[in-house]
Amino acid sequence: MVSADVRPAQIGAALRESKRRLRDSTQAARDALSVDERASASRRIADGLALLPSFVAARSILVTMPFRSEWDSRLIAAIALALGKTVVSPRVDAAARMLTLHRIDRLESDVAPGYRGIPEPPEHQPRIAPSDIDWVLVPGVAFDPFGRRLGYGGGYYDRLVPLLPRGVPRVAGAFEVQIVDHVPTGPHDLAVDWIVTETRTIAVA
């Protein structure tokens, strides 16, 4: 478990600028990984996630599908399906600025490019209530060892996670290049409990 990190909080324009700079630099580092490096690291991340006791115990897991140079989260979804777990993925409701949750039974046919090209379930896939989720894989651009997360700026997961049952494990998979010393956050930015990279597992809480 990681000890707390105490640094002066940023607000307003200073916080937004710090986030922008970190988002740009971390995405560039992730983009610089070769296809082979991403594939190999993705397999190790998925294997590490599958070993977590919370994943083993979970019956219904929420997984966002990979976009651009993100690690391949389809691998942990495939493991979950093979184990008989319910796999759920979010779909963007841009008008409401919220995510709706839908069951996925087959990765090959139940996911297609959607909002801004992000892979997501089509609307006809069965809806799942947030209260039925008992393990969530939280996407992000950057994380720090204290569980702080930098997202893509839309706030979708910050609004979704409070709707999930209290105590649901918040888990992140990430390439090692996405782990930074400090992620600047505001009071409403969510944190994660575990981070799994291709080289280590970080227990935050």
Image (cartoon, helix red, strand yellow):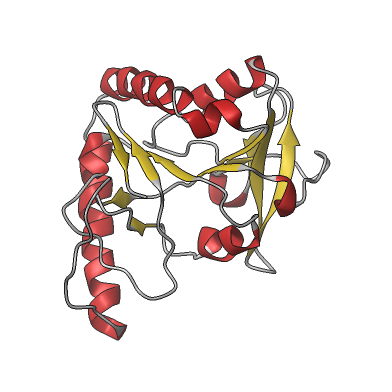
Count how many numbered circles sit on residues in the image.
0
Residue pictured at 83% horizontal, 41% vertical: 124
Residue pictured at 30% horizontal, 50% vertical: 142
The answer to whether residue 107 is above or below residue 175 is above
Horizontal side of 175 relative to 56 (left or right) equals: left
The percent position of residue 81, horizontal first and vertical second, equals 66, 21
42 and 4: which one is in front? 4
The answer to whether residue 83 is above or below residue 189 is above
Q: Quadrant of the N terminus?
A: top left
The answer to whether residue 175 is above or below residue 44 is below
The percent position of residue 197, horizontal first and vertical second, equals 30, 32
The percent position of residue 28, horizontal first and vertical second, equals 23, 45
Residue pictured at 27% horizontal, 65% vertical: 20
96 and 60: which one is in front? 60
Horizontal side of 161 relative to 87 (left or right) equals: left
Horizontal side of 69 relative to 53 (left or right) equals: left
Residue pictured at 33% horizontal, 48% vertical: 204
The percent position of residue 166, horizontal first and vertical second, equals 61, 57
156 and 111: which one is in front? 156
The quarter holding residue 150 reads: bottom left
Residue placed furthest toward the bottom: 12
